[in-house]
Image (cartoon, rainbow, N blue to C red):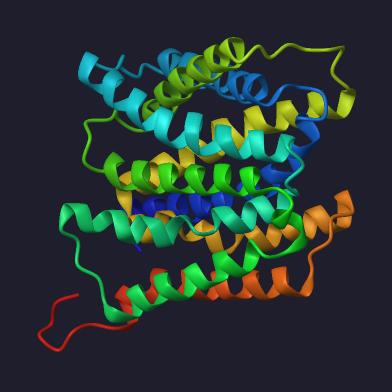
Amino acid sequence: MPQPASRAFWLLLGALFALYFIWGSTYFAIRLGVESFPPLTMAGLRYLVAGILLFTFLRLRGHALPTGREWLAAGVIGVLLLAVGNGLVTVAEHMQVPSGIAAVMVATVPLFTLCFSRLWGIAHTWVEWAGVAIGLVGIVLLNTGHNLVGNPLGAVLILIASLSWAFGSVWSARLPLPKGPMAGAAEMLIAGGVLLLAGHLHGEQLTGTPSTRSLLALGYLILFGSVIAVSAYMYLLKNVRPALATSYAYVNPMVAVLIGISLGGERLSGTEWLALAIILGAVLMVTLGKLLFTRRDGTA
């Protein structure tokens, strides 16, 4: 294939790998991090430090500073995706929601993405809407499992986080975000500041010296889960359809569940495994529905 097409292909493949596998592992890293760090403070440090590192690197490489409009757009998306979307997941894991279960709940993002895209007039096939309906069944089943039935607040927080992430993902393609990876850097800087301020207002404080594994987890979240993966996600949002950009949601849960079981001793009940299968099937229907089914008049 021609050189530009080849480069675009490898960028797409690398971005999807970062989202599928790196982000799948971050749920367990968050669990380790909140053992020593207050949740909002940890999420704030994760994004602020990552934003500073990426912003500094890009400026040294000659990338232009964002304009005022671009900073504003980056702030909106940073709050929706990172401060609310990831911050509430971090709080939920601090409330003892298992990392694998958190990932399964977040797998609903493509379902909500499809619903929100209707606000901008994007048409969908019947199979995609069927996927949303089936996914809702999976969500109800998951909330009857033993990991969430005793933690309704944690379940609600992750649901709000998923809605916020989905809405921000759809809206981001229509906002004047900074060009290239500078979008991710600006969003992380703003989200990190918002999360640290929220933690301060909430009265969060370190109660002791963080453990070594919590510090290592924070470092992993900063470099891999934020600098690399968030940049990859911003690239996908600007270059592919939201459904493909959020397709990581049917890989992340399996990665997170397997890591949680093998390294964290987490367990899923039979009902929760069934809910996982239903949600992943629904997400697959939503992701591939546009490609496999079209209306007879030729429209999607």
**Residue shown at the point (35%, 23%) measured from the top left:** 75
Nearest the viewer among 279 and 23 is: 279
Image quarter in which the N terminus is found? bottom left
- The quarter holding residue 250 reads bottom right
Q: Position of residue 42 (x, y in %)?
A: 67, 23
Query: Where 83 falls versus 189 (above or below)?
Result: below
- The reply, left or right, for residue 209 in relation to residue 171 is right
Residue 266 spot, x, y in % from top left = 84, 55
Residue in the picture at 47% in, 76% down? 134
Q: Is residue 9 visible?
A: no
- Most distant residue in the bottom direction: 296
Placement of 125 over or under 2, stated as above or below: below
Question: Would you say 71 lies left or right of 226 here?
Answer: left
**x, y percent for residue 15:** 49, 49
Residue name at image x 18 percent, y 84 percent:
295
Name the quadrant of the C terminus: bottom left
- Left or right relative to 11: residue 86: right
User: In this view of the protein, can residue 167 be seen by the observer?
Assistant: yes
Residue visible at 64% across and 64% down in the picture? 142
Report the residue that reaches farthest toward the left. Answer: 297
- Residue 146: horizontal and vertical position, in percent? 77, 61
Residue 109 horizontal side relative to residue 201, left or right = left
Instruction: Report which quarter residue 297 is drawn in.
Output: bottom left
In the image, 240 versus 40, the foreground residue is 40
The count of marks equals: 0
